[in-house]
């Protein structure tokens, strides 16, 4: 099976602080990779490096065999938190259409009929069509996460990357999101940061424990690694 994502000897350093230390990782197509580890261990920095949001101090990252700088549209991203001004009226459909914005956008950009069709389709896939014209501020936490996943899916990504998408959700909403991701995993590779080790391990195909570097990679997550590990 071919690789969806590969990191070779990746290091990310902020001034004197090493956030990611000499990491090599291969993620196969169709894998559901769960990244766990302590707060401040560099998990989010690792994801930002994959997304080309932070520069590499050393190493190389390839997406489907191509350099990460040429991977626009191949990765859908669901951030840990998205902040929207409560006074700014933005609907669910507007948020999802934002995923269709081109890398280089001109003033007064207009969405095409195809953009609207794709937004409608992903809303149907996630069963949120009835929310299309609702203001984002009217939604529950679980509904907002579905909207952010829909925005990421509107790019038709080959890899879906999520940074703790179930933070602050109640258990039923959390399970809904996990079941959505399990279904999506039938069509795409998923890489997800999570603290919910008790539940998410049932959904992932591979788990790694990360604290600046990979301390464990396997199918079954050993609970003894959930304690802080010195580097």
Image: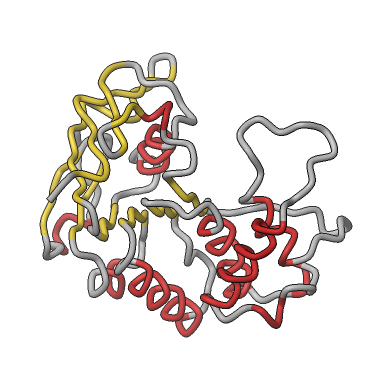
Q: Residue at x 15, y 43 (%)?
A: 215
Q: Is residue 104 above or below residue 86?
A: above
**What's the coloring here?**
secondary structure
**Which of the 4 image quarters holds residue 132?**
bottom right
Q: Nearer the viewer, residue 97 or 116?
A: 116
Total numbered labels placed on residues in the image: 0
Q: Is residue 189 left or right of residue 80?
A: left
Name the residue: 22% across, 54% down.
Answer: 227
Furthest residue toward front: 113
User: Residue 31's x, y, as percent?
Assistant: 23, 58
Residue 98 position within the rendered picture, expressed as x and y whole percent measured from the top left: 68, 51
Q: Quadrant of the C terminus?
A: top left
Image quadrant assignment for residue 193:
bottom left
In the image, residue 116 above or below residue 41: below
Residue drawn where x is 36% and y is 74% of the image: 183
**In the image, residue 2 lies at what x, y percent?**
16, 46
Residue at x 70%, y 58% (from the top left corner): 95
Q: Which corner quadrant of the image does residue 140 belong to?
A: bottom right
Q: Is residue 117 left or right of residue 173?
A: right
């Amino acid at each position: 099976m071919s690789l969806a994502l590969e990191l070779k000897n990746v290091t990310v350093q902020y001034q004197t602080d090493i956030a990611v230390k000499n990491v090599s990782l291969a993620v196969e197509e169709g894998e559901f990779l769960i990244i766990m580890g302590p707060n401040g261990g560099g998990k989010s920095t690792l994801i930002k490096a994959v997304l080309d949001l932070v520069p590499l101090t050393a190493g190389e990252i390839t997406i489907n065999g191509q350099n990460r700088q040429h991977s626009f549209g191949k990765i859908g991203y669901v951030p840990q938190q998205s902040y929207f001004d409560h006074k700014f009226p933005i609907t669910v459909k507007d948020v999802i259409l934002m995923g269709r914005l081109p890398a280089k956008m001109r003033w007064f950009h207009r969405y095409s009929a195809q953009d609207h069709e794709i937004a409608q389709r992903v809303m149907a896939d996630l069963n949120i069509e009835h929310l299309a014209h609702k203001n984002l501020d009217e939604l529950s936490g679980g509904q907002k996460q579905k909207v952010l996943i829909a925005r990421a899916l509107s790019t038709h990504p080959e890899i879906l990357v999520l940074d703790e998408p179930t933070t602050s959700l109640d258990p039923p909403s959390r399970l809904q999101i996990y079941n959505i991701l399990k279904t999506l995993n039938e069509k795409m590779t998923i890489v997800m940061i999570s603290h919910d080790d008790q539940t998410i391990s049932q959904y992932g195909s591979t788990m790694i424990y990360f604290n600046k570097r990979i301390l464990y990679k396997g199918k079954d997550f050993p609970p003894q690694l959930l304690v802080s590990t010195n580097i």
